[in-house]
Amino acid sequence: MIEHFFTCPYCWEKISMLLDPDMNGEKYVEDCQVCCNPIEIVFKIVDAKVVYFEALRLQ
């Protein structure tokens, strides 16, 4: 698991999530730890480093 820090697209608080390298390139939804809104997470990991990360509001 890789910890990644980012800003919530709803409440703008800085939060962290654990990213599973086995889910590399997949989309999934996880709730914000602060405001509980659902965030769509898209990421790519190469050589144990996050090379792409996107946290999106669900429409």
Image (spheres, rainbow, N blue to C red):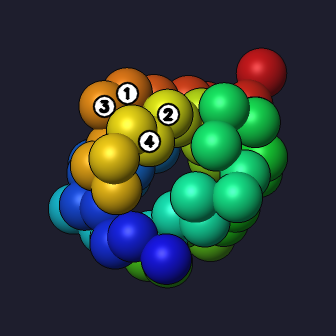
Residue drawn at (75%, 36%) of the image: 26
Q: Nearer the viewer, residue 39 or 41?
A: 41
Q: Which comes sooner in the sequence, label 2 or label 3?
A: 2
Q: Are marks 1 and 2 in contact (CB under 8 Å)?
A: yes
Marks 1 and 2 sit apart, C-alpha to C-alpha, by 5 Å
Q: Which comes sooner in the sequence, label 1 or label 2?
A: 2
Q: Are marks 3 and 1 in contact (CB under 8 Å)?
A: yes
Residue drawn at (64%, 43%) of the image: 24
Q: Are marks 2 and 4 in contact (CB under 8 Å)?
A: yes
Q: Is residue 29 left or right of residue 49?
A: right
Marks 4 and 1 sit apart, C-alpha to C-alpha, by 7 Å
Q: Which comes sooner in the sequence, label 3 or label 4?
A: 4
Q: Say which amino acid is labelled 2.
A: Lys
Q: Is residue 36 left or right of residue 22?
A: left
Q: Say which amino acid is labelled 1.
A: Tyr
Residue 8 to residue 25: above or below: below
Provide the secondary structure element on which disc 2 rests.
strand
Residue located beneath label 2 in the image: 44
Q: Position of residue 29 (x, y in %)?
A: 76, 51
Q: Position of residue 7 (x, y in %)?
A: 27, 48
Residue located beneath label 4 in the image: 45
Provide the secondary structure element on which disc 3 rests.
strand
Residue lying at the far top of the rendered structure: 59
Residue located beneath label 3 in the image: 51
Provide the secondary structure element on which disc 1 rests.
strand
Marks 2 and 3 sit apart, C-alpha to C-alpha, by 6 Å
Q: Are marks 2 and 3 in contact (CB under 8 Å)?
A: yes
